């Protein structure tokens, strides 16, 4: 029974660490995907995450997302 608990502890511990790393590095990962891979939805997600903290940078990502063909970003840009 102890081995079973030990295995579950390892599984959930690993998942917890991965979730924490994703939470910490989410903005950097989205910036990489938007800038290097020209992913329009990643640019839009960056806009949504940065619009309160850094409006000028967020608007740059919004316009980039629209120029890459993301329809929702174009609608948001026209508001």
Image: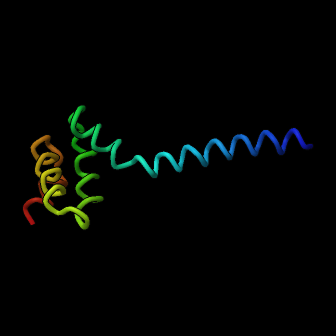
Give the answer, above or below, for where 62 lies relative to 2: below
* Image x and y of residue 28, in percent: 33, 44
Quadrant occupied by the C terminus: bottom left
Looking at the rendering, which quadrant does residue 14 occupy?
top right
Q: Nearer the viewer, residue 6 or 71?
A: 6
Please give the name of the residue rendered at 9% of the width and 44% of the height, measured from the top-left corner: 67
User: What residue is rendered at 19% in x and 57% in y?
Assistant: 58
Which residue is at the far right? 1
Front residue of 54 and 78: 54
Please name the colour scheme applied to the rendered image.
rainbow
Horizontal placement of 15 versus 26: left or right? right
Q: Which of the 4 quarters of the picture holds residue 10? A: top right
Residue at the image position 76 percent from the left and 43 percent from the top: 8
Count of all numbered marks drawn on residues in the image: 0
Tell me residue 3's x, y (percent): 87, 38
Which residue sits furthest left?
Answer: 78
In this rendering, position of residue 52 left or right of residue 7: left
Can you say whether 69 is above or below 73 in the image? above
* Corner quadrant of residue 1: top right
- 33, above or below 74, in the image: above
Position of residue 56 measured from the top left corner of the image (x, y, whole percent):
13, 59
Give the residue displayed 14% in from the left and 40% down from the top.
68
């Amino acid at each position: 029974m102890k081995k079973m608990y030990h295995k579950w502890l390892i599984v959930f511990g690993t998942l917890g660490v991965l979730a924490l790393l994703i939470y910490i590095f989410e903005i950097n990962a989205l910036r990489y995907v938007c800038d290097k891979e020209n992913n329009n939805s990643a640019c839009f997600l960056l806009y949504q995450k940065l619009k309160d903290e850094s409006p000028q940078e967020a608007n740059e990502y919004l316009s980039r997302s629209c120029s890459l063909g993301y329809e929702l970003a174009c609608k948001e840009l026209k508001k």
